[in-house]
Amino acid sequence: MRRLSEQIDQVFVVDNGSGGASSNIVEAVEKLPGVKVIRNSSNLGIATALNIGIREALKTGAEWIANFDQDSAITKNYFKDLFHAYEICPEANRVGMIVPRGWSTTVAKVMQIGTPVWAFVMGAHTSGCLIKSEVIGQVGLYDDDLFIDFVDMDYCLRLKKHGFKILRAMQVVLHHELGSKQTRKLLGLEISFRDHMPWRYYYMTRNRLLLFRRFYLVSPRWVCVAIVFFLYELAQLCIEPDRGKKIRAMWIGFCDALRNRSGRHPQFPASVT
């Protein structure tokens, strides 16, 4: 938050019902210059929280709006470097979103001299992205009913549906962790994976299938790739902890997707405070 407040004039923090030590951090953040905290009484989901912040940002008349998760950290000259890629892109008028190359410190290790400055990509994570305000007027806000997981991909596919491109700044990295990384051995092979709470698997399954239905005509390539990843995640469950709870959550998500149900499920998470 200190880094953000140093690089941009106005920061809106949407607190989804934090408690304990987290609430103390929110109180400290509120004292930073240019920071306004908006408190929700409970966890309304990432999509709704993002939308609350975006509505406030739009009121300022900002041309671009950046979104971040709470566990992300920007680098020095983060926004300057993102806009550099945008300025030299020959199709800048078609760009609706600018994103960093990666969301992990490991990406920085593989970047070499000669790495291109920009590239167009199919999708990207929400955290660290920049969206044109005028694009939001055409594409709309994030889908509240998805609650969490695939909220970002839904928006990326909607951008494509409206004719916009996603520009990746290939020399920019955002420090961000996607779940808890764990390592297991299977048949003598060391396999790494990102572990999540069991209830997250409900939303990952349900929302992925809902997006298949929404966008199979818009982006059949993405659907095919996502199906392969889905099958890989199913196979990966055999080495993950709490796999029984995760499989149950996935099954409920699968059934709800068939019924075209969305919104927050009353059991996942079990307590939303």
Image: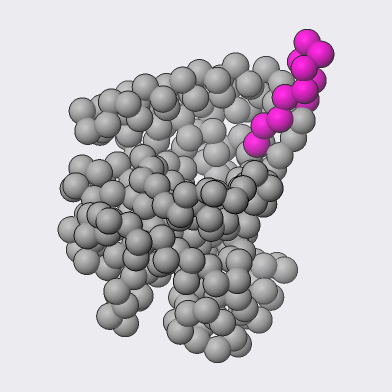
Give coordinates of residue 95: x percent, y percent: 28, 56
> Is residue 131 rendered to the left or right of residue 76?
left
Is residue 187 found inside the magenta-colored segment of the image?
A: yes
- Can residue 15 be seen from the camera position used here? no
Give coordinates of residue 58: x percent, y percent: 29, 74
> Is residue 88 rendered to the left or right of residue 81?
left
**Quadrant of the rendered image containing residue 29:** bottom right
Q: Residue furthest top?
A: 187
Please identify the quadrant where the N terminus is shown: bottom right
- Can residue 188 be seen from the camera position used here? yes
Which region of the structure is painted magenta? 184-194
Residue at 63% x, 21% y: name it: 236
> Is residue 225 rendered to the left or right of residue 247?
left
Where 224 falls versus 125 (above or below)?
above
> Is residue 132 rendered to the left or right of residue 36?
left
Count of all numbered marks drawn on residues in the image = 0
Magenta segment's dominant SS is strand
Q: Nearer the viewer, residue 68 or 267?
A: 68
Q: Nearer the viewer, residue 115 or 36?
A: 115
Give coordinates of residue 31: x percent, y percent: 60, 87
Residue at 34% x, 50% y: name it: 166
Q: Residue furthest front?
A: 114
Q: Nearer the viewer, residue 96 or 89?
A: 89
Where 6 falls versus 127 (above or below)?
below
Give coordinates of residue 148: x percent, y percent: 46, 47
Is residue 92 found inside the magenta-colored segment of the image?
A: no
Residue at 53% x, 55% y: name it: 171
Residue at 47% x, 71% y: name it: 80
Where 32 falls versus 38 (above or below)?
below
Colouring convention used in this rendered image of the protein: one colour
